[in-house]
Amino acid sequence: MQEQAVNLGANSAAPMSLPGRPLLAPGEMWRRPLPYLAKDHLTRFLTRLALHLYRRHFLEVIGAERLKPEHDPYIIVLNHSQRSEAILIPGLLFFLRDGKRVHFMADWNFCLFPPVALLYRCAQVITLARKPAKPKFLNVFKPLFTDKMPAFERAKRRLEEGAPVGIFPEGTVNRNAQELLKGFYGAAQLSLETGVPLLPVGVRFPTNPAGEVISEASPQVIEVGEPLVPEKIISNPSPDEVRAWHARMMEEISRLSGKQWQSNSKRK
């Protein structure tokens, strides 16, 4: 399949390789119908508002046709270099998918900020409960934002329902412009146990000064790779099988993001 670079601006014929050229045009963001959010007025408004405020943050999306709802379900996996990605990338995906959600996994601590908690609720985020709050007394609010069912099982349920799931396998913000973290194995295990493809995505920052850490202000180019499809469903994959599939996934994210990855990186 030939990859297509998507420009949602008014002049779609304009080249998208020029630094600083925005991907999203304000008029298009507010006029474009989002049929999957037709009855969810709040989520539709917040999606448009977030993309309007940060419209210059996205320069180009390559391979966006692979994100379409007709390809569901899949597990979208991508590198994580900015805090804002946890909100902006899901919003962009909603927009590109005509309003159909991708259910991202994210830490519950962010829900302690009411505006973020509202966005998480609208996005139907799968909250992870493994990290305690700081300071500790805030843990009293944890039951309000987490579920008795483990996040891994909730992600499985979403995939069984035919909905895509989003995971940042590095597990934290990594501003290193040259290297990926080793990453966690959850996405690879989820893919093997369900047979659902991994959809690798690389996020690059072409205007970020060479050799410097990635800043929150650096605009993004997003490239969606070919899906990685498990050969078969493995209900109880061995550690070696999970590690091998994780390595395949991270190598592809490495290629797409332009960051190096090594299996013996410092952080798991």
Image (cartoon, rainbow, N blue to C red):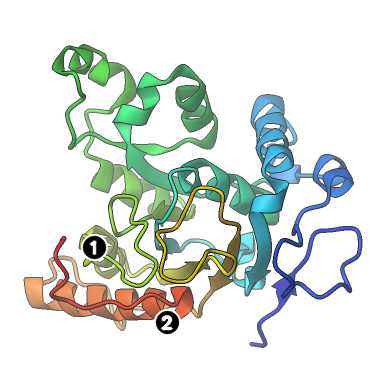
30 vs 56, nearest the viewer: 56
At label 2, which amino acid type do we have?
Answer: Arg
Task: Classify mark 1: helix, strand or loop.
Answer: loop
Place of residue 213 in the rendered image (x, y in percent of width and height, measured from the top left) = 40, 59
Could you tell me if the residues under marks 2 and 1 are in contact, i.e. CB atoms within 8 Å?
Answer: no
Is residue 33 among the parts visible in the rendering? Answer: yes
At label 1, which amino acid type do we have?
Answer: Gly
Name which quarter of the figure residue 75 lies in: bottom left
Place of residue 95 in the rendered image (x, y in percent of width and height, measured from the top left) = 69, 49
Residue 159: numbered disc: none
Q: Is residue 45 left or right of residue 89?
A: right
Q: Is residue 86 left or right of residue 168?
A: right
The answer for how far apart the CA atoms under marks 2 and 1 are is 15 Å
- Up/down of 150 relative to 197, above or below: above
Q: Residue at x 87, y 68 (%)?
A: 12
Q: Which quarter of the figure is the N terminus placed in?
A: bottom right
Q: Residue at x 76, y 44 (%)?
A: 35
Place of residue 99 in the rendered image (x, y in percent of width and height, measured from the top left) = 67, 46
Sort mark 2 into few (<14), some (14-19) or many (20+) by Cα contacts within 10 Å.
some
Task: Classify mark 2: helix, strand or loop.
Answer: helix
Place of residue 123 in the rendered image (x, y in percent of width and height, measured from the top left) = 52, 36
Residue 183: numbered disc: 1
Q: Which residue is mark 2?
A: 255
